[in-house]
Image (cartoon, rainbow, N blue to C red):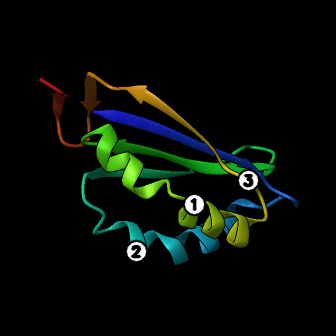
């Protein structure tokens, strides 16, 4: 599994309520993306940085999302250039589902 951290500096600070409203408008588009296991929208405590943490079945699945078109969408929506960092995730603890997932 692959975890991807996406971050971007916002041109103006967002409150938690503003972020929730904005993120809620884009969340449905991630429901049917092949290979995406989970996505967390994130906002820094000071409201100056936003992004997402994505858990993917594979890096190939992840790379299909982070295209030039996707980067254009982020720039248009948030006014910022996203950074994308990939991490290996060989083990995930899921307390909500009550299990441990491995990539074996």
Residue 56 picture location, percent across and down: 31, 43
Say which of marks 1 and 2 sits in front: 1
Do tag 3 and tag 1 residues touch (Cβ < 8 Å)?
no
The quadrant of the picture occupied by the C terminus is top left
Check whether the beta carbons of the residues at disc 1 and disc 2 lie within 8 A of each other: no
Residue 29: where, in percent of width, then height? 41, 73
Other residues around mark 1 within 10 Å, as few (<14) / some (14–19) / many (≥20): few
Can you identify the residue that label 1 sits on?
A: 68
Location of mark 3 (residue): 81
Q: Nearer the viewer, mark 3 or mark 1?
A: 1
Left or right: residue 104 compared with residue 4: left
Which element type, helix, strand or loop, lies under badge 2? helix
Residue 18 visible, this angle: no
- Seen from this angle, which residue lies furthest front? 68
Q: Mark 2 highlights which residue?
A: 28
Q: Measure how far apart labels 3 and 1 are at the Cα level.
A: 11 Å
Pointer 3 local density, CA inside 10 Å: few below 14, some 14–19, many at least 20 = some
């Amino acid at each position: 599994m692959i975890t991807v951290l996406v971050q971007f500096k916002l041109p103006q600070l967002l409150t938690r309520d503003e972020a929730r409203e904005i993120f809620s408008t884009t969340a449905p588009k991630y429901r049917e993306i092949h290979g995406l296991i989970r996505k967390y929208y994130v906002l820094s405590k000071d409201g100056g940085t936003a992004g997402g943490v994505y858990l993917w079945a594979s890096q190939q699945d992840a790379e299909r999302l982070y295209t030039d078109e996707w980067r254009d969408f982020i720039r248009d929506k948030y006014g910022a250039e996203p950074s994308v960092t990939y991490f290996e995730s060989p083990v995930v603890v899921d307390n909500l589902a009550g299990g441990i997932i491995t990539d074996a």
